[in-house]
Image (cartoon, rainbow, N blue to C red):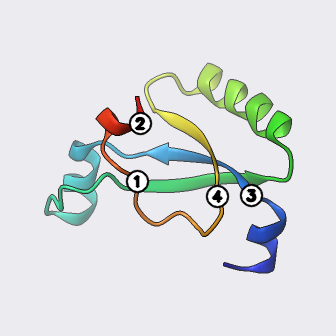
Amino acid sequence: MTYFQQLHPWCIIRVLSNEQLLDNAGVNSGVQQSNVVARFRRRNDAVAYLQVLQHSIKNIKFLIIFDVQGVQNLPDDEALS
């Protein structure tokens, strides 16, 4: 984890669906993947940016997380709900 990531623990991540994983990798690993879209020092800043993203991009799922050790893989959607 870089120093910047340590200073900006609040992350907005884009959760990739299984179809997107198949398109990107050509094979389905069965693990839900995610991409960090932006990092913030404060949760309020992350919430405000998430609202902008959800308003402008309606068909993509975004989540806010507090990233302590870096985003690698996330559990399935059922565990997040």
Cα separation between marks 2 and 1: 9 Å
Decide: marks 3, 4 in contact (CB < 8 A)?
yes
The secondary structure type at the circle numbered 1 is loop
Which residue, given by chain and number where applicable, does mark 4 sit on?
67
Disc number placed over residue 80 in the picture, else none: 2
Which residue, given by chain and number where applicable, does mark 3 sit on?
9
Report the side of 10 relative to 44 (left or right): left
Cα separation between marks 4 and 1: 11 Å
Quarter of the picture holding the C terminus: top left
Disc number placed over residue 74 in the picture, else none: 1
Of residues 50 and 57, which is closer to you in this image?
Answer: 50
Q: What's the amino acid at mark 2? A: Leu
The secondary structure type at the circle numbered 2 is helix
Cα separation between marks 3 and 4: 5 Å
Quarter of the picture holding the N terminus: bottom right
Q: Residue 14 placed where, x, y %?
A: 50, 45
